[in-house]
Image (cartoon, rainbow, N blue to C red):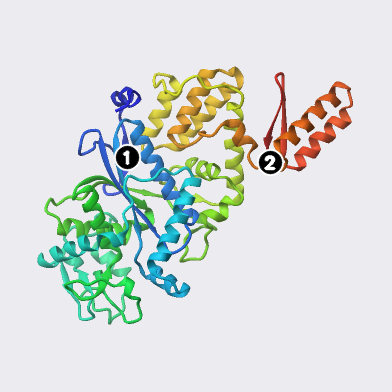
Amino acid sequence: MSDRAESVLPFMSLRIHNTLTRSVEPFASIEPNHVRMYVCGITIYDHCHVGHARFLIAFDVIARWLRTLGYRVTYVRNITDVDDKIIRRALERGIPIRELTTEMTQAMHEDMAALGIEPPTHEPRATEHIGGMLDLIGKLESRGLAYRAADGDVNFAVRKFASYGRLSGKSLDQLRAGERVAVDSGKNDPLDFVLWKAAKESEPDDAKWDSAYGRGRPGWHIECSAMCKALLGEHFDIHGGGMDLIFPHHENEIAQSVGAGDSGRFANVWMHNGLLNLDNEKMSKSLGNFFTIRDVLRRYDGETLRFFFLRAHYRSALAFSEANLDDARNALRRLYTALDGVEASSNEIDWSQPQAAAFRAAMNEDFGTPEAVAILFELAGELNRTRSPATASLLRNLGATLGLLVQPPRAYLQGGAALDEALIEQRIAQRAAAKQARDFARADAIRDELAALGVELMDSAQGTRWVRS
């Protein structure tokens, strides 16, 4: 463990909102100084949309902060690479499923790199764990919690699992009222869910596996249970995902994992990020109201998008709009502008500093990034007044715990300017000469020319700097 981590450990007082208990609770890892965390990943049949970016960034920050506190973090985020949507898309394109999922995984990794998202410890593909899924299904069947249906599917018998509905907070009757299942589905009860799907003639061979139940493929829910068990064990610390996964996906995960397990336990803490909304509707591909991450990155840099998310608490709903992104970009530029021209004096955080202590307190209260970001602006204001290397260090190092302010300030501020740097500097020199000659009309004309090309000039006693406007 690093010296920095050891200096933080005595101050740990992390509290996390647990969906299972509906309260913010003190966090204690099962294994001292080691957090095991599973987050439901992406079904990779298309490019990621910005709703995906919300949960990816939220749990990236959570993992970063846990490490800042001195924990060793084993972070598992899966890839669903067999699914109805994947099969349909592969058939539409006339390519094998593996070719589609490999292409989309590579695109996903490129998007994550642009957003500053660190790779998880493990990124398992569902198709690598078919054997583990079948083992779980066999145990559920032997314990009377699963049955073979007339249509060839294997289903989980929900009413035989006594605590079903605890995560979502709904009774079986409430959940039953919201279900719509075809009469001929083969299920004994509309609440039952599929564990193994019998193969269909219309489906390609690369979507079928041999099993004791005949050729077929796993249901969506059993995938995560198998990957959790394989990489984290039956009992681990944190399970996360979007709020839209609470029911039925995470409810079903608990039922099948606990039902097939021997410990009676699964994840201690359930964390769910709020959804991204467009025109007051959840952003999703199924609704057709989405922008891909790549769409957004054509107009905004990745750190701006990251900063946009972190200004809101991870559990809150968030409205997506160009106006909000523009505001985030301008605010982030203010932080970089404060750092520009001041050399940081240290790569370490002095947690005894008042702003550092306040930042830590905000993050330790259920990862309070809005309050933490406000402290960054407080430091930026102080830096603008004092130009202190120590303040610059604290601002940069605290920002880095969130994956922010990690670029050289001048490089960030000048990125994407419409003119090359040498020509901009030439115009600045011409403007300085015009001002010295008291030709203020010429000086103003040069400023206006550069402004029209997206370059903002900033005058100070030390000279003129330029940034991308």
Q: Which residue is mark 1?
A: 16
Q: Residue at x 89, y 26 (%)?
A: 439
Depth check, front residue: 282 or 406? 406
Identify the residue at image location x=38%, y=37%.
64
> Seen in the image, is 456 located left or right of residue 226?
right
Kindly tell me whether residue 360 is visible in this rendering.
Answer: yes
The type of residue carrying mark 1 is Ile
Residue 27, by quadrant, is top left
Image quarter where the C terminus lies is: top right
In the rendered structure, find residue 424 and report the number of the disc placed on it: none
Q: Position of residue 111 (x, y in %)?
A: 49, 51
Q: Residue 305 at x, y = what percent?
A: 53, 45
Pointer 1 local density, CA inside 10 Å: few below 14, some 14–19, many at least 20? many
Circle 2 SS class: loop
Q: Is residue 283 above or below residue 430?
A: below
Residue under numbered circle 2: 417
Q: CA–CA distance between discs 1 and 2?
A: 42 Å
Quadrant location, the N terminus: top left
- Residue located at (27% from left, 39% from top): 35
Nearest to the observer: residue 174 or residue 40: 40
Question: Which dot, 1 or 2, sits closer to the camera?
Answer: 2
Q: Position of residue 201 (x, y in %)?
A: 32, 82
- Secondary structure category for the residue under label 1: strand
- Give the residue type that dot 2 points to: Ala
For marks 1 and 2, the one nearer the N-term is: 1
Residue 365 in which image quadrant:
top left
At x 24%, y 57%, the residue is 225
Q: Is residue 170 visible?
A: no
Left or right position of 387 against 200: right
